Amino acid sequence: MATITLIKPNIPVKLPEGLSEEKLLGFSHFNNWLTTLTHSLSLQHTNAAHPFHLDPYTLRGITIQSFDLFGRAPRQRLGFLKLIAEIKNSAGETLPGSIFLRGPSVAMLVMLVPDDVPAGHEDDERYVVLTVQARIPAGSLAFVELPAGMVDEGGTFAGTAAQEIKEELGLEIPASELRCLSDLVATTSPIESNATTSPIESKGNEDANGDENGGEGEGDENLPQAMYPSAGGCDEHIPIFMHERRVPRETLKEWTGKLTGLRDHGEMITLKLVPMRDLWREGARDAKCLAAVALWEGLRSEGKL
């Protein structure tokens, strides 16, 4: 196992056989994670209200345990990383640092309303398109979830969402017609008085400005405006996009049970349409689905949608 030394921050990184320094440092998901973590660690020193201010933790080193490559030689690119980050304070106490790096994804809440429903009565018949497909990590061959997809290197969230909708649902929607529920949340006003909110959390709320990294005020960790499905072990974060359109009632019947997906990528997807009012129940196993329900209902209650 080879060891390299990063300049910023100045720490050793152990690399497994087959992973070069060039390939690691060219992996944007690693760089983004390290930049975010380094910034968050710096807040211990600059913010006297930080819970770790008196005995701050530092990143002592990183061990890359394994990696996965995407694509075919000679154009293979780094896809996933499994690593251990050693983070300690002066007392020798450590923070959990076992991490699976895979980068961001997007999820799409696509809602269809029959075109014969009178205006103003959309809540009576609003359907959500779900996908049913194999999710082997969950041990399932028929997992029900919102359409979703990984954001490739250099890709945009909205562009990826539009592409996934086309691939999984067979529906072409320009990226400009998608609305990001996660960004809309960042533009809402925080509760003016909340006795349970810490100084750090309160400051972070005040600085939320709707951009991808949040604000940059003191105490703000600059985390993306997105849902983290497994923050205890993975860097994946998922902004939730939405799109609603009217379609002929016959289209709803045609889509139920429709087979889609990119077969050469191993995607065997069946579509499932469910009433919006039942989405929380139908997608109860899917974190993306539950997040979409919460965001959609919360934004509607505040008049943002």
Image (cartoon, rainbow, N blue to C red):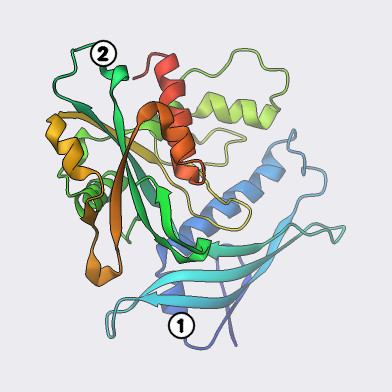
Residue shown at 24% from the left, 47% from the top: 165
- Placement of 217 over or under 285, stated as above or below: above
Q: Nearer the viewer, residue 72 or 186?
A: 72
SS label for mark 1: loop
Reading the image, the residue beneath label 1 is 20
Which image quarter holds the N terminus? Answer: bottom right
Which image quarter holds the C terminus? Answer: top left
Q: Position of residue 139 (x, y in %)?
A: 51, 64
SS label for mark 2: loop
> The residue under label 1 is which amino acid type?
Ser
Residue shown at 60% from the left, 34% from the top: 218
Label 2 Cα neighbours within 10 Å, binned few <14 / some 14-19 / many ≥20: few
- Placement of 254 over or under 138, stated as above or below: above
Q: Which mark is residue 121?
A: 2
- In contact (CB < 8 Å): disc 2 and disc 1: no
Q: Nearer the viewer, mark 2 or mark 1?
A: 2
- Placement of 269 over or under 199, stated as above or below: below
Q: Position of residue 147 (x, y in %)?
A: 33, 48
Query: How far, Cα to Cα, is label 2 from label 1?
Result: 58 Å
Q: Nearer the viewer, residue 222 or 235?
A: 235
> The residue under label 2 is which amino acid type?
His
